[in-house]
Image: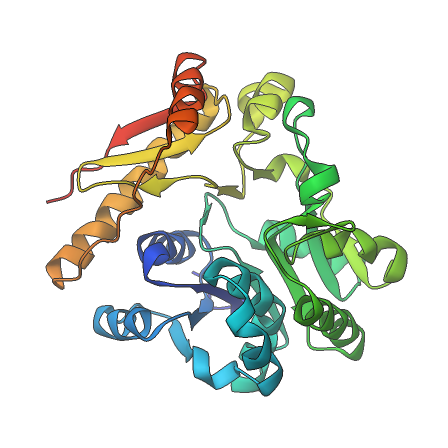
Amino acid sequence: MNSNRSTEHFVTLFDHNFLPLGMALHDSLMTHAQPFHLWILCMDELTEKQLQLISLSNVTLIPLKEIETKELLAVKPGRTLGEYCWTLTPFAPQAAFNRDPSVERVTYLDADIFFFDDPRILLREFDRSRKDVLITDHAYAPEYDQSHTSGRFCVQFMTFRKTQQASKVMKWWQNRCLEWCFARIEDGKFGDQKYLDYWPELFGDIVHIVQQVEKILAPWNVLFFEEKVGTKVYPVFYHFQTLRIVSSCKIRLYFGYKIGKLGLSLYDQYLKSLRKCLTVLNAHHIEVPYVEQKKEKWEMLRYLKRRITKIVRFASINYL
């Protein structure tokens, strides 16, 4: 069916804690992105061993040590695991290029996104732009706008061609993240992400900003687009930010946002895939990682307030 289409290359990175979500991402690519190849940068040896055991189709694993330069190793001790993941993100596309010289472009994906349609819908727009790098707006709903702190753009879905122009942007980003990449707001910076705010000015002729914003949904905008456009909204992908598996029978779907009927239907579909992935882990005797919900007293009060105002939701995730 897809014999005339070229293989799209994607790259992601995650550790053991995000293994089920990374598997769900792969499951969505199997459904919507054929033919494709997914490069996974394994953030620890446990993740690498478990993925080798599972042996996902159309996947190549990249061990962390393979891309850790002396510059990366020098900054690693001063950064948390999350901050180091952010630091490595600009290096992930290059890792795929280095592994396979035939690859002409690579799209970086956050491990917690999930495709509901063909990513080529966005990539065709990119092709029409004739530019070398693709980035996406957060497209925040007004009530959730965090552009000032988290940045206008989201690192969730980024495409780089194998060109000198794209390499220039990638190298600039790599250098900035080596210099500073922390989970705090400081001098207009935040993690790896707020650096992208400079790109339209610095690299305007190179960088394309996706125009189909209604095709890229997340907790911070799904209700806004549902109310604005109605049932016509159906995303290419949804970013399941704040979703966490908290026990063998419970999952936190979202935290800090109000989600409408459209959004909840997307979560229902995602849960089907996630349960399937958890069943695979169980069949291979791989322990499912849970995220502990640690709440101090002041956090508990805020948590209860969120439950009352319906901006946090849990669901059953029984898979045994």
Which residue is pictured at 38% across the width and 57% down the height? 22
The scheme the figure's colours follow is rainbow
Left or right placement of residue 170 versus residue 1 in this view: right
Left or right placement of residue 26 versus residue 85 in this view: left
Q: Position of residue 103 (x, y in %)?
A: 58, 79
Q: Is residue 59 above or below residue 315?
A: below
Q: Position of residue 282 (x, y in %)?
A: 14, 56
On the rendered image, what quadrant is the C terminus found in?
top left
Q: 95 or 269: which is nearer to us?
A: 95
Displayed quadrant of residue 174: bottom right
Q: Position of residue 104 (x, y in %)?
A: 64, 76
Q: 3 or 99: which is nearer to us?
A: 99
Left or right placement of residue 146 versus residue 3 in this view: right
Which residue is pictured at 29% across the width and 46% down the height? 274
Q: Say whether residue 319 is visible.
A: yes
Q: Say whether residue 100 is visible.
A: no
